[in-house]
Amino acid sequence: MPRPLRPQNCPELWYKSVNCAFPARPDTGGAPRWKNRKGRQMPDRNSAGFQLRPLETEDLTTAACWLQNIADMACFDRSTRVPLSAPGLEQAWELFNDTKANASKCWFALTTESGELCGITGLESISAVNRDAVIAMFIEESRRRQGVGIRALALLLDFAFRQIGLNRVTSYYRADNTRSEQLTARAGFATEGRMRAAWFAEGRFFDMVTVGLLREEWDASRKTLAQELGGGPRVSFRGAEAAGWAWPPGPADAPD
């Protein structure tokens, strides 16, 4: 989560990560917690339901573990090149440094039904005047190719356009990051520009692609995407299933 208002630190839509053991979360909402023979928390790999909740400082321990792979980190983060500890990550991303409410950013943890952290997503540089924001996402490696990322992205887009009244969202990705390219295209993002040799990693320069999505475009493509996704895993806001805040949309929130 670099500072997106500064051109040299534009965040992109992350969709690549590394595998890592997960620390147990104290709050699992009463869900069963599987343990191995040594009594350690076992990863929940069979969850069919995922939830978004506010990101907490304790989540950074897991996130920092994901970011120990330098090559992987350089693929999705344009500004960070050195592996960070949890405190270093907190300072670099400036998520919890200010005790006052920060209306310019909104970050969520993506968890399994049992509370296991498996990704993070959020909005940066939220502008009440321009009604836009920068969107980013990070999915842990073992959760890729399961349909979780596109559903979490769709739910966050619903939140951006239908809850806080944004009119557009923007994202950036390294030109060779085909996963981000496919994910944004599937959600309806349009390619708006290409910054030549704007991303240095692995001893060479890459182009950086800018994509954007307007509210009217999301409203037009939302129903088609919901029908395309059908069943499979479901992502919802924690505790808000009855209000229709889930993706794919349920009976309480039929696609427009």
Image: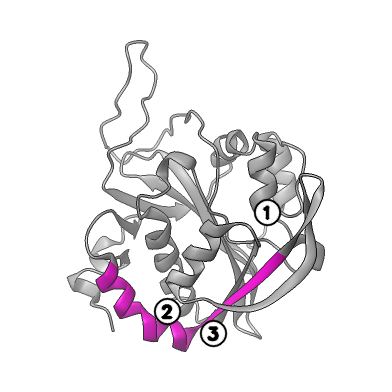
Which image quadrant for residue 217?
Answer: bottom left
Question: Where 253 sits versus 78, above or below?
Answer: below
Nearest to the eye among marks 2 and 3: give it. 3
Nearest to the eye among marks 1 and 2: give it. 2
Please give the label number shown on residue 225: none
| Residue type at the position of mark 2 | Arg
Identify the residue position indicated by label 1 in the image.
Answer: 99
Image spot of residue 127 (x, y percent): 65, 78
Identify the residue position indicated by label 2 in the image.
Answer: 162
CB-based contact (under 8 Å), mark 3 and mark 1: no
> Between marks 3 and 1, how big is the CA–CA gap?
28 Å
Q: Which residues are magenta?
A: 208-228
Residue at the bottom extreme?
Answer: 216
Secondary element at tag 1: loop
Q: Say few, some or many: other residues with alpha carbon within 10 Å of mark 1 (under 14 / 14 to 19 / 20 or more).
A: few
Q: Quadrant of the N terminus?
A: bottom right
Q: Quadrant of the C terminus?
A: bottom left
